[in-house]
Image: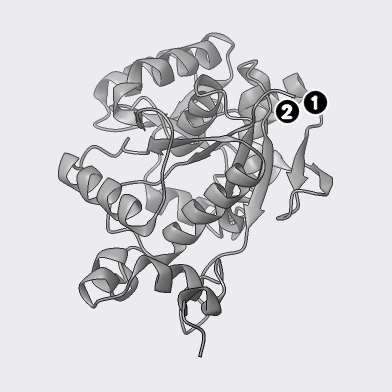
Amino acid sequence: MDQPIFRFAPSPNGELHLGHAFSALMTQQIAQANDGKILLRVEDIDTIRCTPEGTIQMLDDLDWVGFSWDEEPRNQSDHFDDYAKALEKLRSDGLVYPCFCSRNQIKSNANGEKDPDGAPLYPGTCKHMSQYDREKRMQDADAFAWRLDMDKAIEKVGDLTWQELSEDFTEVETVKANPAAWGDVILARKFTPTSYHLSVVVDDADQNITHVTRGKDLYFATAVHRVLQALLELPEPKYLHHGLILDDEGKKLSKSKKSLSLAALRKRGWTPEQIRVQLELEEEEDLDENGD
Ligand SMILES: [Zn+2]
């Protein structure tokens, strides 16, 4: 078997927290246990919220907590041309269309239907527009989004599945993908040639990622990624969606909660070892070198 290639792909749009440390260190443990390579990807397509300083801080936090990676990190901001090329292929295959709806318009037209993330499901308002109207509005609009025509996409690629690994890597489950639940997802915007969904599949293929480890919050999004991989004729990695680190109220940690950021814990005197114990990635007695 070829060497497995793993990746950790954080976004430098705020301080990393315990949830990121868990995902990074868990990926590292699995990679080491399987003689794998581990790559770092900086997901900085949001050029307003992601700054070079943020990236430097992020790499420093990762280094501090004991995460190490092979090869130079890949910055998504260096690859806008690659995403634009992928979008162009989908466009020339007639699989994307421009959408001019505002958030509020989508909300009021959505009939209460929600996507797997709980956001209003896009009702397809702009799907059937004449070519003339489309081109005119694209010229005039300050902003618009490129959406995937999910019905057409599913018709083209048929039923899809993905391979989901257990955390100990011993079991594989074949999961039936349900991309229709997402409706016509956004793949790019007028001035940003990509979205999370599009860049992640392009990057995973470019970096030859064989195993995608990430949080369960992205479990259902895998269906969209499988569709894009099939449409763009990209290889299919295996997936492992791990549990999330929750706050005291049982909610997913977010970057807006500064209290549990790695930088804040570091300032308060935490050690990387204490963080690994807190995340249950290391046994507490390992810390106590002299026993008692
Ligand atoms: Zn629309």
Q: Is 82 placed above or below 57 here?
A: above
Q: Residue at x 52, y 69 (%)?
A: 245
Residue 5: image location, x then y, percent: 58, 31
Say which of 274 and 62 sits in front. Answer: 274
Residue 187: image location, x then y, percent: 47, 31
Residue 273: image location, x then y, percent: 41, 69
Say which of 68 and 55 sits in front. Answer: 68
The amino acid type of the residue labelled 2 equals: Ile
Q: Is 186 placed above or below 110 here?
A: above
Residue 158 — which label? Answer: 1
Would you identify the image quadrant in which residue 172 lies? top right
Would you identify the image quadrant in which residue 270 lies? bottom left
Say which of 28 and 79 sits in front. Answer: 28
Residue underneath mark 2: 154
Say which of 40 and 177 sits in front. Answer: 40
Q: Residue at x 46, y 75 (%)?
A: 287
The amino acid type of the residue labelled 1 equals: Gly
Question: Is the residue marked 2 within 8 Å of ligand 1, measured from its CB?
Answer: no
Identify the element where label 2 is drawn.
helix
Q: Residue at x 39, y 50 (%)?
A: 103
